[in-house]
Image (spheres, coloured by chain):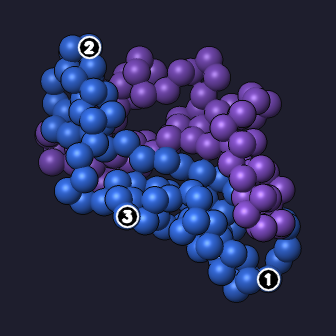
Chain colours: A purple, B blue
Amino acid sequence: MSVAKVYVTLKKGILDPQGRAVKESLDSLGFSGVEEVRMGKYIEVKLRGADKDKLEKELTGMCEKLLANPIIEDYRYEME
Amino acid sequence: MSVAKVYVTLKKGILDPQGRAVKESLDSLGFSGVEEVRMGKYIEVKLRGADKDKLEKELTGMCEKLLANPIIEDYRYEME
């Protein structure tokens, strides 16, 4: 069993209304030192099998097809 | 300026319907080797100031009060 940690973030320059809303909420809670907030996704995927090369290839497919939207999002992953 | 990376995950044992839906979508896309998917949040926070201790204290407050729900979620962060 392998565990993959996938991080999905909006590409630079893509507007992040959710991050903006969180930043404004932090401001109104009194956290005045916040410059910017960007929201992303963190996904843990448990995979059967131990062949790292094969698993990484499969994981890239998952990211491209479902976990991330490659038009507006970047992704990266770590495999344990 | 410091950048904090915050990871918010559901506590162990808390049901994750979103992760389950993603797992089932991956199955139906033909990715048969997936055992489990758990969804979390990845948040980048740009903070003004350079006093790491003060910033970490502030960040803990942000996590406890807004970024995570401490009842059902765990959080951890890295500061750059």
Q: Is disc 2 on the same chain as disc 3?
A: yes
| Residue at the disc numbered 3 | B71
Task: Look at the numbered disc 2 and give the secondary structure of its residue.
Answer: loop
| Residue at the disc numbered 1 | B51
Taking the image as shown, residue B60 lies to the left or right of residue B20, namely: right
Mark nearest the camera among 2 and 1 is 1
Mark nearest the camera among 3 and 2 is 3
Task: Look at the numbered disc 3 and give the secondary structure of its residue.
Answer: loop
Image x and y of residue A17, in percent: 72, 33
Q: Which residue is at a point 72% across and 42% down the rendered structure image?
A: A21
Amino acid on which the number 3 mark rests in the picture: Ile
Mark nearest the camera among 1 and 3 is 3
Q: Which residue is at a point 74% across and 83% down the rendered structure image?
A: B54
In this view, the residue in front, B58 or B1, is B58
| Sequence-earlier tag: 2 or 1 | 2
| Residue at the disc numbered 2 | B29
| Sequence-earlier tag: 3 or 2 | 2
Give the quadrant of residue A49.
Answer: top left
Image x and y of residue B30, in percent: 21, 15
Tell me the crowding category of disc 3: few under 14, some 14 to 19, or many 20 or more residues within 10 angstroms, Cα based. Answer: few
Amino acid on which the number 2 mark rests in the picture: Leu
Quadrant of the snapshot with the C terminus of chain B: bottom right
Quadrant of the snapshot with the N terminus of chain B: bottom right
Amino acid on which the number 1 mark rests in the picture: Asp
Residue reaching furthest to the front: A28
